[in-house]
Image (cartoon, coloured by chain):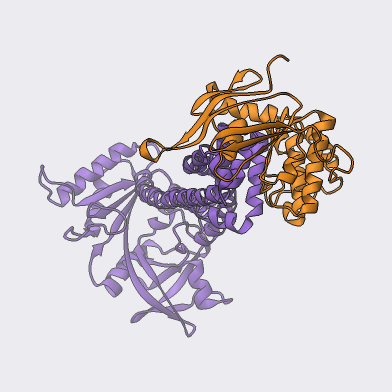
Chain colours: A purple, B orange
């Protein structure tokens, strides 16, 4: 009986192909939206945590202010000084390196070309701590750091944009009012998963940036790598205590800086993307519900249109539940068809979207199954009322229907 | 079989309630034996349709009793009456009532579908039924591609594909011209004579009723006359 009802339903769907297509469009859009949103969201979450995890698990990052991510509140919190670096190095045990970092946006000019990028002012420990490799040339030495020498190490993107096919080593790049000599080229890390280009950077000694670009002795953030044999938690606590002392924070007051390890950063960032994924998924789920109402609407129209047919079926001996089943299965078949098309569309959209956003495409069987199940369930829920109306028709009245 | 196929006793059918109530049937007593060919006649509003609906188990009497082979139809629920229709009754309507955009073959197979017959059994039975009404090879045509007479033949094939005990025909020739009407009535007569199917036919055309072996005339919801037709048309050569 169910098999027959399914055949009947498919025949009915084929008979009104255009109308069937428009009916399920809502479900198609709903299902594909839900799956695409969740799949891309999961990909973005994975990308963020992968990238941060690639920095290693022994990294602490200290920033002024308490919040991380967009809209962080660093206003009022004092920047760090080079003296903080020295203090951390000497007073906290178990640290492999303490790296000050200061950033400045500038326009670079070389070979009659220019390029806007961010300059990173730091120490030579920055390269090892950030897991950067040198492709050619060298990094700056201690003497250059102390002197604030006009020497820079550039990323692959800068090399390509400014020097093209020429060897950049020994060339001069104009940064604002001064020129610096390219002494090294970083090995490419490739496109970042957050959508930015990791190779688009220029690294100089901290002192050079402070003197010639920012004009202050501030340090924007500190990167600390903890020795493998030392405990991350203890190091973190000690760093916090020292910084509280140095920043004169009273016993009852909150920190005006944040110390985060890479795991925490990954969690914070992926937490954000998870919330976004959930919200987008919820919006998409509403559209799925709207699609269900569309199915109910058309099924009600269909029952009215086919009143006479229902009368004939009842007259020749169809049971109430057989008519109910026929229309219910028709609604479920419509909704499921919408679900299948939606899944196919979502797969294409997710693969395309993942490529565009530079996030990995993670096929998520759970969300695909869930969306399909949900669309079929919508067929049952929204198909039930029209189907019951059909089944309860009085055969005499139904046969009289024009 | 001691029980008659149909036994109506004191059957009434009232529509509406109170002052607006309308009595379509006012106490009908009628017994029809297996193998009969009965024409039910009467003017509009005489209760023909109400009677057909009750005979066809689509409706139940408001009062009185309808026994189908001794089975009290008024005691059956909706699904039980549907099963009775499925297994014992066949309907032919004035408006043919075929499923549109569905081939003749599929229309004829429909009652077998609800009986749960296999695909092969359905195909074979439907082909045989179509052949029996003279529509061999027309199975793939949809109703829109068939003439009125052909559509009614398909409807008859659908009614007899289940080998019903009772064939109920409600104005089967009402939408057809004289020649098609003759063909259809001849078909009904032949089915009754050759297959022993009991036929109850509602008509207001006396020349169609003349083919029946018994003519029941309804007036104002009551049986006014019940006449045996000793020489039904079509049976006696040259009677037409």
Please provide percent x and percent y for residue A259. 27, 47
Image position of A167 (left or right of B95)? left
Q: Residue at x 31, y 58 (%)?
A: A70
**B44 and A219: which is toward the camera:** B44
The residue sitting at 62% across, 55% down in the picture is A16
Choose between B126 and B131: the one closer to the eye: B131
Picture quarter with the N terminus of chain A: top right
> Residue at left 28%, top 42%?
A236
Tell me: residue A153, above or below residue B207. below
Q: What's the residue at 61%, 36% (across, down)?
A: B52
Q: In terms of depth relative to the viewer, which is nearer, B20 or A25?
A: B20
Would residue B99 appear left or right of B19 to someone viewing this image? right
Rendering coords of residue A30 (x, y %): 48, 52
Res. A326 in view: no
* Residue sticking out furthest to the top: B2
Q: Is residue A169 depicted above or below A351 in this figure?
A: below
Residue B35 visible in image: yes
């Amino acid at each position: 009986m169910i098999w027959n009802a399914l055949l009947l339903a498919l025949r009915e769907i084929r008979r009104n192909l255009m109308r069937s297509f428009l009916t399920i469009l809502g479900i198609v859009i709903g299902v594909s939206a839900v799956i695409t949103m969740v799949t891309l969201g999961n990909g973005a979450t994975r990308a963020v945590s992968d990238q941060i995890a690639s920095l290693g698990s022994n990294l602490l990052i200290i920033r002024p202010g308490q919040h991380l991510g967009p809209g962080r509140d660093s206003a009022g919190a004092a920047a760090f000084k080079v003296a903080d670096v020295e203090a951390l190095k000497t007073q906290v045990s178990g640290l492999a390196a303490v790296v000050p970092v200061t950033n400045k946006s500038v326009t670079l000019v070389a070979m009659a070309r220019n390029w806007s990028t961010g300059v990173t002012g730091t120490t030579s420990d920055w390269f090892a701590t950030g897991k950067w490799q040198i492709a050619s040339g060298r990094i700056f030495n201690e003497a250059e750091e102390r002197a604030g020498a006009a020497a820079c190490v550039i990323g692959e993107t800068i090399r390509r944009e400014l020097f093209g096919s020429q060897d950049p080593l020994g060339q001069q790049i104009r940064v604002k009012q001064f020129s610096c000599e390219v002494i090294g080229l970083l090995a490419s890390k490739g496109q970042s998963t957050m959508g930015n280009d990791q190779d688009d950077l220029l690294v100089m000694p901290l002192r050079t940036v402070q003197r010639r670009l920012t004009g202050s002795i501030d340090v924007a953030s500190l990167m600390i790598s903890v020795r493998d044999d030392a405990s991350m938690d203890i190091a973190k606590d000690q760093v916090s205590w020292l910084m509280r002392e140095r920043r004169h924070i009273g016993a009852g007051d909150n920190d005006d800086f944040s110390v985060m390890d890479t795991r925490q950063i990954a969690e914070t960032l992926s937490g954000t993307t998870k919330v976004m994924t959930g919200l987008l998924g919820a919006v998409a789920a509403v559209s799925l519900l709207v699609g269900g109402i569309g199915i109910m609407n058309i099924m009600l129209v269909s029952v009215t249109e086919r009143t006479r047919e229902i009368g004939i079926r009842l007259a020749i001996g169809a049971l109430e539940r057989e008519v109910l089943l026929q229309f219910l299965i028709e609604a479920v078949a419509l909704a499921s068809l919408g679900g299948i098309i939606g899944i196919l569309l979502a797969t294409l959209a997710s693969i395309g979207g993942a490529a565009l956003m530079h996030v990995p495409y993670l096929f998520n069987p759970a969300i695909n199954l869930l969306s399909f199940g949900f669309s079929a369930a919508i067929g049952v829920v929204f198909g039930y009322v029209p189907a019951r109306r059909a089944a309860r028709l009085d055969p005499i009245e139904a046969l009289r229907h024009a | 079989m001691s029980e008659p196929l149909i036994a109506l006793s004191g059957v009434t059918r009232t529509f509406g309630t109170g002052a607006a109530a309308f009595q379509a049937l006012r106490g009908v007593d009628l017994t029809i034996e297996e193998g009969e060919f009965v024409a039910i006649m009467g003017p509009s509003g005489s209760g023909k349709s109400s009677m057909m609906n009750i005979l066809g188990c689509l409706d139940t009497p408001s009062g009185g009793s309808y026994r189908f082979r001794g089975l009290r139809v008024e005691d059956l629920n909706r699904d039980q009456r549907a099963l009775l229709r499925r297994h014992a009754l066949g309907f032919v309507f004035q408006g043919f009532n075929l499923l549109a955009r569905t081939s003749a073959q599929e229309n004829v197979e429909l009652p077998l579908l609800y009986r749960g017959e296999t695909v092969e059994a359905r195909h074979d039975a439907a082909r045989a039924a179509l052949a029996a009404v003279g529509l061999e090879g027309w199975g793939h045509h949809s109703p829109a591609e068939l003439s009125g007479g052909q559509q009614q033949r398909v409807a008859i094939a659908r009614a007899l594909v289940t080998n019903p005990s009772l064939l109920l025909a409600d104005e089967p020739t009402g939408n057809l011209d004289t020649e098609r009407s003759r063909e259809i009535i001849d078909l009904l007569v032949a089915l009754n004579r050759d297959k022993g199917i009991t036929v109850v036919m509602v008509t207001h055309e006396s020349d169609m009723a003349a083919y029946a072996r018994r003519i029941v005339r309804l007036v104002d919801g009551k049986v006014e006359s019940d006449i045996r037709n000793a020489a039904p048309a079509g049976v006696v050569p040259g009677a037409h």
